[in-house]
Image: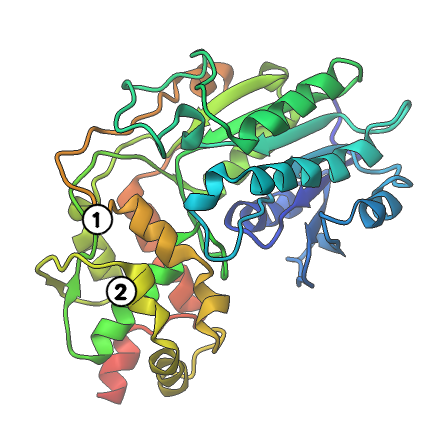
Amino acid sequence: MSTAQSTVLIVGATGVVGQACLRHFASLPGWSAIGVARRPITPPPGAHSLQLDLQDSAACAAALAGRDDITHVVYAAVYEKPGGLVGGWRDQEQMDTNLQMLRNVVEPLDRPGGPLRHVTIMQGGKAYGVHIHPEIAVPARERWPRDAHENFYWLQEDFLRERQAKAGWHFTILRPRIVFGDAMGSHMNPIPAIGVYAWLRHEQGLPLAYPGGPARVNQAIDADLIAQACAWAATSPNARNETFNLENGDVFVWQNVWPTIADALGMAVGAPEPQSLGATLAGQQQAWERIVDKYRLAAPRKLAAFIGQGATYADFQMNHGKTGPLPPVIMSSVKIRQAGFHACMDTEDMFRKWFGQLQQRRLLPTAAQARTLA
């Protein structure tokens, strides 16, 4: 298939996955990329933007039904209730809303004779019940029967399978592990929240103490790797109507990578201090404003606009409030590698990369700035 006429709609373009996908597709020859978000965005060079409320079916139909250029969709949007990040994952209203949002995008594009060729959606470890089961078998495999719990993943997947069976396009389901990137205000990106926590401690003259609970062997995925996988899935016959686990290619334990995180942020490691990042950062608006002003940062002055619900998400991923020992959470990525996608990344390098990028963009201070102002 020639990519000369390929146009991809990146839905959820302000999120940690969508932002990376928009950058990546915009950089590829033969692709036109359109980022969709509820709020205005400034697209990267080579990309376009479309402001759209995915919960407004009439607006989505008006914006998309007449398009004759959109050949691919990467759907990376998710609706999370404010303040209910983890608990909301099993909320029926939240699940119904996520289904309706996907329907509002796909239905106007799925029409006889239309150009649509491929749709990619995201699931994740919750497909295996990692959020409700004390233990899952290792490694989790895509061929397992569907885990018997309510999840908007299943609603979206069933909708796609029903539509695709009557159409000429295909879909791919990606299941990334813990996602890390540079998106601001994301509900499921721990990087900005960890960075804020670190610099709040720095300004108090404190070392970087690990705040989480007991150790657990886990996996991560770099957001840019997800973007590369989406580009591969968009055109590979091996990805048609398939589900793939996706991770960096190694495993990690938070306590073991914490010294790397501290070094990337220019801080010394302290003894562990178990605490909720969600609770710790909730009352730090004024302290964050002082950091923004002191270091002349380009970050949002409103702390919530920078970290979203990322602190609560970090609590969940760092096992806050849990008691050990905790079983590992490992998903096999053999299937996607056998299908032809081979990219990988060292997880420690990933943490250095993303904290470094936030510093380069003046969203977090650097150790050099701190020395200069000392």
Q: Which residue is mark 2?
A: 265
User: Is 371 left or right of 39, judged from the image as shown?
Assistant: left
- Amino acid type assigned to the residue bearing label 2 in the image: Leu
Residue 291 to residue 87: above or below: below
Residue at (75% x, 33% y) in the render: 106
Residue at (27% x, 46% y) in the render: 348
Instruction: List x then y, in percent, for residue 7.
Output: 76, 39
Instruction: List x then y, in percent, for residue 70.
Output: 80, 37
Q: Is residue 354 visible?
A: no
Which of 291 and 225 lies nearest the eye of the viewer? 291
What's the image's color scheme? rainbow
Which badge, 1 or 2, comes first in the chain's sequence? 2
Which of 22 and 76 lies nearest the eye of the viewer? 76
Closer mark to the observer between disc 1 and disc 2: 1
Q: Which residue is mark 1?
A: 321
Residue at (64% x, 28% y) in the render: 234
Secondary structure type for disc 2? loop
Which image quarter: residue 230? Answer: top right
Instruction: List x then y, in percent, for residue 321.
Output: 21, 48
**Labelled pair 1, 2 in contact (Cβ < 8 Å):** no
Q: Residues within 10 Å of mark 1 (few under 14, many from 20)?
A: some
User: Is 254 left or right of 108, judged from the image as shown?
Assistant: left
Which of 300 and 229 lies nearest the eye of the viewer? 300
The mark found on residue 263 in the picture is none
- Amino acid type assigned to the residue bearing label 1 in the image: Gly
Dividing the image into 4 quarters, which one contains the C terminus?
bottom left
